[in-house]
Image (cartoon, helix red, strand yellow):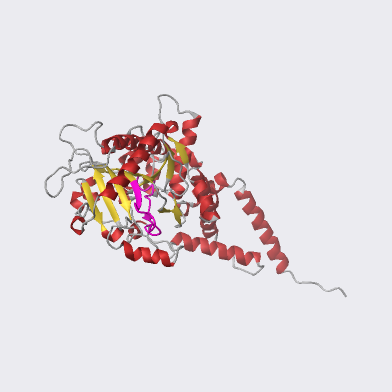
Amino acid sequence: MDDAEANILASLGRVRLCDLAAADGLPSDGYKMCVSALTQSLAQYSAAVVELPPADGALLRSGLDSARLFFHQRGYGSGEAGGGSGDAREWCKTSGYYADPQMWLEIYDFRPGITPVEPNGVAELPPSGLPDMFSVLGKVSREVLDAISFSLNLRSSTFTELLDNIPLRSQEVSSSVLSACCHSRPSMEGTQQHSVASQDDEQLLMFSDQENQIDKTLLTLVKSDRSGLYIKDLHGRWILVDGDLGPLDIVVYPGLALYRETAGYVNPAVHKTEVGNLQECMFGRCSLVFKLMPRSVARLSGEEMRAAGHGVDAQFQVPILVNDFMQTEHSANQLFPKNNEPSPHVEQEASYNFVMKRKKEGRKTKALPPSKRLRLEAQRVLKERVQDIADKKGIKLRFCSLRDCESHIKSLDHPCENIRTEIGWPPGVPFVHPHDLPNKAKLRFLEAYEPGWTASQQDLEEYRGSFHHLEHTPTRLAH
């Protein structure tokens, strides 16, 4: 691991589960600090580390040992390949053992409410301890989800309607699933090929074919016996997130369902798993993966985000049934398109930088019209001041439309009130992109974040006027 990677690992948010437990009354300073560390890490790295109590940590380590032995004793047959999740309509019914040779992966899914059976009709013997681990990780995921709802200023238990009953009612099947996974076990078909590649170059990192995976979960929790989980951070870099974990630590990262329900305020993790460099390990890389899933009959609507005062883009305003959502294809390129065409705001920023550069170089430039100069200055202040405040607080800026905001800004309980207060948005100014504000509102916006801006512009105009006068005054030669 190089120094840069080590620094990134050290920056991942690390919180103790006991500090995430919410209590009645006002939140303690410790709770607020813990939630802040968690949400900032999710915003920057799309992952965080949660430290479990000693008893829970010991249970998971025991579970990893059991999973390792389960896969080691089980022979792999090509007839078992692809039996787990090939049909998107069966997303909430996977259970038991299956294998994916393309990803050098074997999985045993534990889903309460379903008893897996072997092809011969005999009940399948699972790794031991799965029910207890399911209960522990289910509790952890709900605590993390509550912390995220607190950070977004949502009502407590906001996501309860999306989740399974506790405990499950009669005849109910769990939507969430606990998977015991094994990557690159030597007996897997095709392992020989990637082992040869690893032996030829010990520094070569090999990954599964699906390098840009996004879980359709609310949250995913992972505990592994070896490092190898990479997640893209805010800047698009692949970060090894489980390379420096303690015995009580687990990795948690958000999924696509949470992204949808929070109207894009919590980005899903884009991840991949290293499958090379395991040729000397007879057990492969074993993991316990808990996926907190929404109920198939629930709806993802983002209504709670609007009720809390957050701006919600049009793409999130149409409710969608979870079962339909799970059967819809989503790719990283669709969610985060790499658009090479500059946006209007980027063009404005480039124009502003070009003008400032020419001024610094002392070249003569035609003065910009006041309205255009206001737009460029508003764009600059948005980038240098407002965005910086939002990033430090883990807030994603999503502006309202001018017409809607002008209609509700005078009400006592307007939807964008909370986010306006958090970032210090000037009172009475609609919460829309500064480029779209009327000129008078632009001036109030600029004065709010750069006090004295108007006076400085007047001084600049006076200087320009005097300079222009001197430039055009004929020079008299002394006789």
Viewer-proximal residue among 362 and 25: 25
Q: Indicate the quadrant containing the C terminus: top left, top right, bottom left or bottom right.
A: bottom right
Q: Identify whether 11 is placed above or below 329.
A: above
Observer able to see residue 430: no
Image position, residue 293 (x, y; %)? 28, 43
Viewer-proximal residue among 64 and 261: 64
Question: Which residue in the rendered view is the most extreme toward the top?
Answer: 25
Lateral position of residue 140 relative to residue 395, left or right: left
The boundaries of the magenta stretch are: 261-287
Question: Which residue in the rendered view is the most extreme toward the right?
Answer: 479
Lateral position of residue 380 relative to residue 330, left or right: right
Q: Identify whether 363 is placed above or below 290.
A: below
The residue at 18%/57% (across/down) is 79
The residue at 25%/45% (across/down) is 109
Give the main secondary structure of the magenta stretch: loop
Viewer-proximal residue among 130 and 320: 130
Q: Identify whether 129 is placed above or below 269.
A: above
Observer able to see residue 463: yes
Q: Is residue 265 magenta?
A: yes
Image position, residue 15 (x, y; %)? 46, 38
Image position, residue 284 (x, y; %)? 35, 53
- How many numbered marks are there? 0
The residue at 21%/45% (across/down) is 95
Q: Is residue 205 magenta?
A: no
Question: Which residue in the rendered view is the most extreme toward the bottom?
Answer: 479
Image position, residue 189 (x, y; %)? 27, 61
Tell me which corner region of the image, top left, top right, bottom left or bottom right, holds residue 352.
bottom right
Viewer-proximal residue among 379 and 118: 118
